[in-house]
Amino acid sequence: MYWGKVLGGQIGGGGVMEEEVWRKGPWTAEEDRLLVEYVRLHGEGRWNSVSRLAGLKRNGKSCRLRWVNYLRPDLKRGQITPQEESIILELHARWGNRWSTIARSLPGRTDNEIKNYWRTHFKKKAKSPSDAAEKARNRVLRKQQFQQQQFQQQQLLQQQQLLQQQQQQYQAQQQLQFNFDMKGIMALLEDNNTCRAPYAAPQSRHEMINMQQNTTEEQGFSYSMLNANLSETSSEETFLDGLWNLDHGNFTVANSASKVGLYNLVAPFC
């Protein structure tokens, strides 16, 4: 099907204004090929030049919609997934019928596709637009509450783990300090046992003076006894030497002191 468009300012030789005829209806494979080739060479956005540069009998709006909704290489084929449906509900509750804005959050899906899906699956089922929006808002709210609960639980778990680590470190420090103190106590006990003296200290200064006097007297007495013993020993040795010489008929002694002593001992018996 074709429809005509009057080209202003262009008059044919017969005085009749020329008309540019646009084709309508389904696109053919050849038309799709020409449009894809045009976008590859010139890029998107110059849709009004397609008919002149590519030889298509389609207006700019028709070419744009055909490319965006069907021929774009990054389009997602197939039905909308449950995850995409949840996003559509959430964003529609926030932005309403702003389908182009919603489509930016769904890569590969067109605004027209999202609009048709919404009208087919939600608008007819809902009693009113406000009812569907309310359900969507409630769904979004439940999702946010769930995420917040998860975040709080994670924070609580991290705090518990941190507290447990701090308690373990404190207990370890206490145990190390206890071991260190016990080693010090045992070392002091060993030093005391080694340095302990086996004597009893005097109780007063008077007792210390008496002990010193007794010690001096004992030393003097011991010295006198030692001299007496030495004198007795010398006399006995001299007497025995004299008797030994008498038995053998030799009265001569080594020194004069010994002779005198021996004479004095023998004289009473003569």
Image: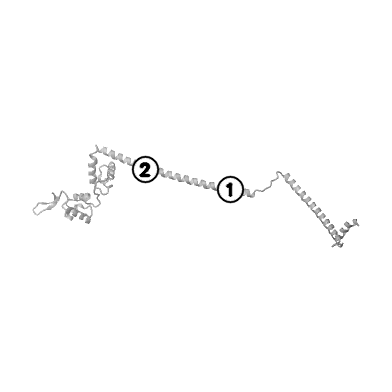
- The residue lying at 49 percent from left, 45 percent from top is 171
- The residue lying at 41 percent from left, 43 percent from top is 157
Mark 1 Cα-neighbour bin, 10 Å: few <14, some 14–19, many ≥20: few
- The residue lying at 39 percent from left, 42 percent from top is 153
Looking at the image, residue 160 lies above or below residue 55: above
Q: CA distance from mark 2 to mark 1?
A: 54 Å
Q: Where does label 1 land, which residue?
A: 186
Please tell me which residue lies in front, 74 or 236.
236
**Which residue type does callout 2 highlight?**
Gln
Instruction: Please indicate whether residue 154 sits to the left or right of residue 60 in the image.
Output: right
**Residue 83 percent across, percent down from the top left:** 29, 45
Colouring rule applied to residues: one colour
Please tell me which residue lies in front, 192 or 18.
192
**Which residue type does callout 1 highlight?**
Met
**Residue 68 percent across, percent down from the top left:** 22, 50
Please tell me which residue lies in front, 152 or 36.
152
Disc on the earlier residue, 2 or 1: 2
Which quarter of the picture shows residue 33? bottom left
**Does the residue at mark 2 contact the one at mark 1 (Cβ under 8 Å)?**
no
- Identify the image quadrant of the C terminus: bottom right
**Residue 196 percent across, percent down from the top left:** 65, 48
- Secondary structure of the residue carrying tag 1 is helix
Mark 2 Cα-neighbour bin, 10 Å: few <14, some 14–19, many ≥20: few
**Residue 215 percent across, percent down from the top left:** 75, 49
Front of the two marks 2 and 1:
1
- Secondary structure of the residue carrying tag 2 is helix
Residue 150 is tagged as 2
Instruction: Please indicate whether residue 242 sits to the left or right of residue 201 in the image.
Output: right
